[in-house]
Image (spheres, rainbow, N blue to C red):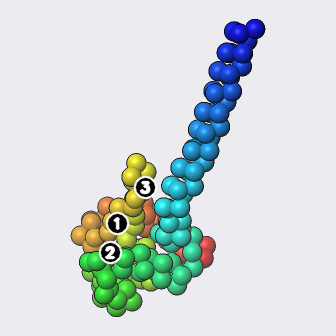
Amino acid sequence: MENYQKSIKSLFEILRLRRNGVVFSALLFTVLMGCTNVEVEEAFKGDLRPGKANKVIGEYCQSCHIHKDFDSPLHVSNVRGLYKSRVFRKARECRSCHYIEKDWMHNQHERKTRMPEDANSGKFRKFEKKELSRLRKG
């Protein structure tokens, strides 16, 4: 009888710890999901309307102290001429030249730019083809 009570008590302790583990996991998942900015990711993927995407990306970039006073419409019109490719020369969206890479380990984004020198040398041909096809469908 005593062994039976000990095993029942052990079972309840395991279940209690397991339940706490599930609760902890759910809480951790909620916190981590709260730290991601899904709208920013959608904007960079091209899942939002161009005007909305530019607004989201502009606000995201202005959250950095370096780009605090940044004027995105002026920037777009100024840099288009630096590119040879039609995709970049006709660009109206920030995401044409800028993109993010997700660092899953630290749940952060790394901001990247498709620089004119790299784009002009053909480094982003795959992206350009995808964009041209998307624009044709649009």
Give the side of residue 82 with respect to residue 35, left or right: left
Amino acid residing under circle 1: Arg
Label 1–label 2 contact, CB within 8 A: yes
Give the residue at mark 3. Answer: 107
- Residue at 27%, 80% in the rendered image: 82
Location of the N terminus by quadrant is top right
Q: Between label 1 and label 2, give the one nearer the viewer.
A: 2
Tag 2 or tag 3, which sits nearer the N-term? 2
Give the side of residue 41 with respect to residue 85, left or right: right
Secondary structure at badge 2 equals loop
CA gap, disc 1 and disc 3: 13 Å
Q: Measured along the vertical axis of the image, is residue 64 above or below residue 7? A: below
Which disc is residue 64 wearing?
Answer: 2
Find residue 106 and report its horizontal and vertical position in percent: 39, 52
Is the residue marked by circle 2 packed among few (<14), some (14-19), or many (20+) residues within 10 Å?
A: few
Secondary structure at badge 3 equals loop
CA gap, disc 3 and disc 2: 17 Å
Question: Going by the picture, which residue comes out furthest to the right?
Answer: 1
Q: Measured along the vertical axis of the image, is residue 107 above or below residue 114? A: above
Would residue 56 be visible to someone looking at this image? yes
Give the side of residue 71 with respect to residue 48, left or right: left
Label 1–label 3 contact, CB within 8 A: no
Amino acid residing under circle 2: Cys
Is the residue marked by circle 1 packed among few (<14), some (14-19), or many (20+) residues within 10 Å?
A: few
Location of the C terminus by quadrant is bottom right
